[in-house]
Amino acid sequence: MTQPTRPSTGTSAPDSPAPRSLAPGTIAAATYDAPVSEDSQPAISARHPGPAKLPRKILVLGATSGIAEATCRLWAAEGHHLFLVARNSDKLAMVAADLRTRGAGSVDTAVADLDDTAKHPDLLAHAVNSLTGLDIAYLTHGVLGDQAAAEQDFGHAAQILHTNFTAPVSMLTWLANFCVQRHSGTLAVISSVAGDRGRKSNYLYGASKAGLSAFLGGLRNRVDREGVKVLTIKPGPVKTAMTSRMPGNAKFADVDAVAQAIVDAVSKRRDTLYVPFQWQPIMFVIRNIPEGIFKKLNL
Ligand SMILES: NC(=O)c1ccc[n+]([C@@H]2O[C@H](COP(=O)([O-])OP(=O)(O)OC[C@H]3O[C@@H](n4cnc5c(N)ncnc54)[C@H](OP(=O)(O)O)[C@@H]3O)[C@@H](O)[C@H]2O)c1
């Protein structure tokens, strides 16, 4: 594999070492690998549970997303260190500037199209070096896609699956192996209630999130015993740019309330979060509607 190029970055911490090149499978050894010192920030792990409010080193993938931005505002107010990744440089710069004024311990950025999986190892190496470690990786990016277009054009369907499933699997594979080596870290990932059962109105998006939820369940089963936490976040409809053209969106969940629930779930080291909470019983009912009835519904 050719060595991926370094992503363009925003302000770097002055003491950030330059990222090293990586070969496949070597991120854990090739990235920041200094031993955890007595005075370094404690990682969140079963073996080293840290007090909830100590500054954490947080990597945010898809940092310009409405939900990510709201979550980062809360983390910034608690003084955590943030490394933000997004593909829109102007938007990213605005988000980063806002988070600095809100009290983040530090904010560094990288511009990257997360669909480009070949660049993931170098991107992660850069983030880990900039943060000088990693306590939380928060993976939020995603696309709703156009269900009608995806029904006619496999190219569009494949694009939805790539952005929402394949690219996160690539990123999480690198991240999980890095965290397992250090026996610490939390991987918090936004899936969706749409992945709990396919519906005709959005089954391509739903399939991508179903795959992601299944992957996260398996990953958790593998890495939890290694001290690495995996949180699957399943929001119902939330008021963000993604849903701004949907009918009835005024009644969707408030993004700040969703963000607070995510921050709490990370702190409490939960496995799964339905947010708002009522989506858990709602999806229980929807999953259990017999197929003979379900296929006649317009959902
Ligand atoms: N809003 C809801 O009702 C809802 C419900 C359930 C789950 N979710 C999930 O929540 C997550 C956040 O969504 P949101 O509601 O906050 O929507 P949003 O504001 O539209 O955020 C989506 C973000 O993903 C980014 N993105 C998409 N493809 C990318 C790529 N290839 N590389 C880098 N960034 C990329 C977008 O960047 P650009 O701004 O550059 O396009 C945007 O910042 C998504 O995974 C979504 O599926 C949302």
Image: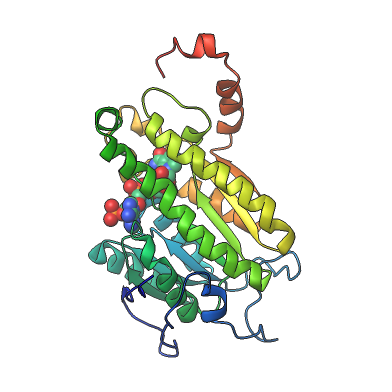
User: x, y percentage for residue 151?
Assistant: 29, 28
Vertical placement of 230 versus 195: above or below?
below
Vertical placement of 76 versus 224: above or below?
below
Q: Residue at x 73, y 71 (%)?
A: 48
Tell me: 179 left or right of 139: right
Tell me: 32 left or right of 267: left
Question: Observer-nearest residue: 110 or 210?
Answer: 210
Tell me: 283 left or right of 111: right
Q: Is residue 132 visible?
A: no
Considering every residue shown, the one lying at the far bottom of the view is 15
Q: Residue at x 36, y 75 (%)?
A: 3
Q: Residue at x 45, y 77 (%)?
A: 22
Q: Residue at x 41, y 19 (%)?
A: 299
User: x, y percentage for residue 196?
Assistant: 53, 32
Tell me: 185 left or right of 89: right
User: x, y percentage for residue 259?
Assistant: 49, 51
